[in-house]
Image (tube, helix red, strand yellow):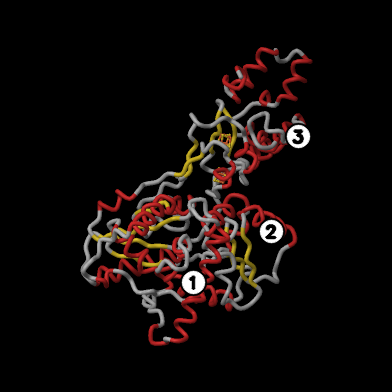
Amino acid sequence: MKKDSLYHAIHINVEKCIACSHCVKVCPTEALHIWDGHSNLDPERCIDCDECYRVCPVGAIQVEDDGLSQIENFTTKVALIPSVFMGQFPIHVKAREVFKAIQTLGFTYVYEVEEGSQLVEELFKEKIDSNEKSPYISSFCPAVLRLIQVNFPQFTDNIINLKTPVDITATSVRKQLELKNKENIGVFYFTPCSAKITSLKAPIGEEESELDGVINMDSVFNKIQAILNNQIFIHKKNKKEISNNAIQPDHILWSLTGGEIKNLQGTCLSIDGIKNIISFLDRIETRGCHEIDFLEMKGCDQGCAGGILTPQNRFITAQRLRNRAKYYSDFYSENPDKSPIHHTDGISFDEVKTNEIKPRSIVKFDSDPMKALLKMQKTQEISRKLPSLDCVACGYPTCKSLTRNIIEGNAELEYCFIYQRKAEEKGDLTPEKSKEVLEHIWGERKFKQ
Ligand code: SF4
Ligand code: SF4
């Protein structure tokens, strides 16, 4: 699928939005502001962390869903399911039953995403051993990569330029099926968050994604649950069309917090939650951290189990996955001849590395040094006129954000109500004009109320 670098899977339904500003206050990159009586998204700054979605009280932030019908464009339909999807079901529900239910929805093949983790883990170990950089940063979570691109550009060099397990498994599966002369292959991923939908349409470090589509986990879960409840499987004659279990027990936990560093040597840290990640990166930005070899960072609490599209509680999901990993670990110890098969063994490092990940080009100051100096002076001048209250009354999350938008030509000093009062006192602004400005920001509806 071709790239659209400003694409985001979340959208604001302006009809539903009540301009409460909750989303504006939690957005870690100041990508949201209120204008025209509703929230507005700056696609350059959004990192797809889904924090805004979690706090919206009226469901006005919505996630795009391409739905199941997209698979009909392909003859060979492959479902790639992450472990957290299995974690949506109690341990007594067998993986094989879930796979059969997925086939009943129309998929020809079902593979587990974490097959690709084996190769990623080996390459992480090689990087850590090379000791060329510290700390290395995992490329797993797309929201974290975008956060680094937008807020911490100096750390882009520390990211290991590697495809994620889902892309590696997609490459491997496609190769296997092409060898079997399968035609018109479509590979679809069941996603737990919006960041992975964005990764398909605007991949980081790649021109094109290995996937043909994503399917939102919450919507497909309900369909699978209904099939399982009613036992209405459509049995395929050729049972081999369901993939063998090909993941190591430890890799079942890969997408949870701590899953990537489980088998790594050296000083490796695992941090989850976008706020924790920001405060950690802020800390190492100022104090450095040469003692740390590797950083696993996942934007959601409990890793992918906490994604907004996972229907079950994240703690229960994580525990189910730990139980599942334990079950397979015991099973393989007792049955070594049934150990997992690695379909990704024949894939080389060149096939899985991505291009260098570069900072996102949010131009702060002009590339011309003279113009940049003037802009810097203007920024200081505007900052002095604003009250540093960060009250959001101007529609922007902070006075700093309003300043930046004034410089970029998107906002005016008059948006600040403290500035308005001072300007009114001096006779530079009429009360009618002040009201008009506030109505533009918060919408006429709020004033009529
Ligand atoms: S997804 Fe995250 S970065 Fe994007 S607007 Fe919402 S809170 Fe901000
Ligand atoms: S949280 Fe944001 S999108 Fe939701 S109603 Fe409030 S302002 Fe609108």
Badge 1 density bin: few <14, some 14–19, many ≥20, Cα 10 Å: many
Q: Taking 144 as reference, is 239 left or right?
A: left
Q: Secondary structure at mark 2?
A: helix
Label 2 CB sits under 8 Å from any ligand 1 atom: no
Residue 159, x across and y down, in percent: 56, 63
Residue 318, x across and y down, in percent: 55, 64
Contact (CB < 8 A) between labels 2 and 3? no
Looking at the image, tell me whether mark 2 or mark 3 is earlier in sequence order: 2
Contact (CB < 8 A) between labels 1 and 3? no
The residue that label 2 is drawn on is 280
In three-dimensional space, the C-alpha distance between marks 2 and 3, rounded to whole angstroms, equals 25 Å
Which is more toward the observer, 237 or 138?
237
Q: Secondary structure at mark 1?
A: helix
- Mark carried by residue 389: 3
Residue at screen point 63% across, 62% down: 271
Q: Taking 192 as reference, is 184 left or right?
A: left
- Rendered image quadrant of residue 296: bottom right
Badge 2 density bin: few <14, some 14–19, many ≥20, Cα 10 Å: few
Amino acid type, residue under disc 3 in the picture: Leu
Q: In the rendered view, would you say 253 is above or below 341?
A: above
Amino acid type, residue under disc 2 in the picture: Phe
In three-dimensional space, the C-alpha distance between marks 2 and 1, rounded to whole angstroms, equals 31 Å
Amino acid type, residue under disc 1 in the picture: Arg
Residue at screen point 58% across, 78% down: 129
Residue 132 visible in the displayed image:
yes
Q: Secondary structure at mark 3?
A: loop
The residue that label 1 is drawn on is 324
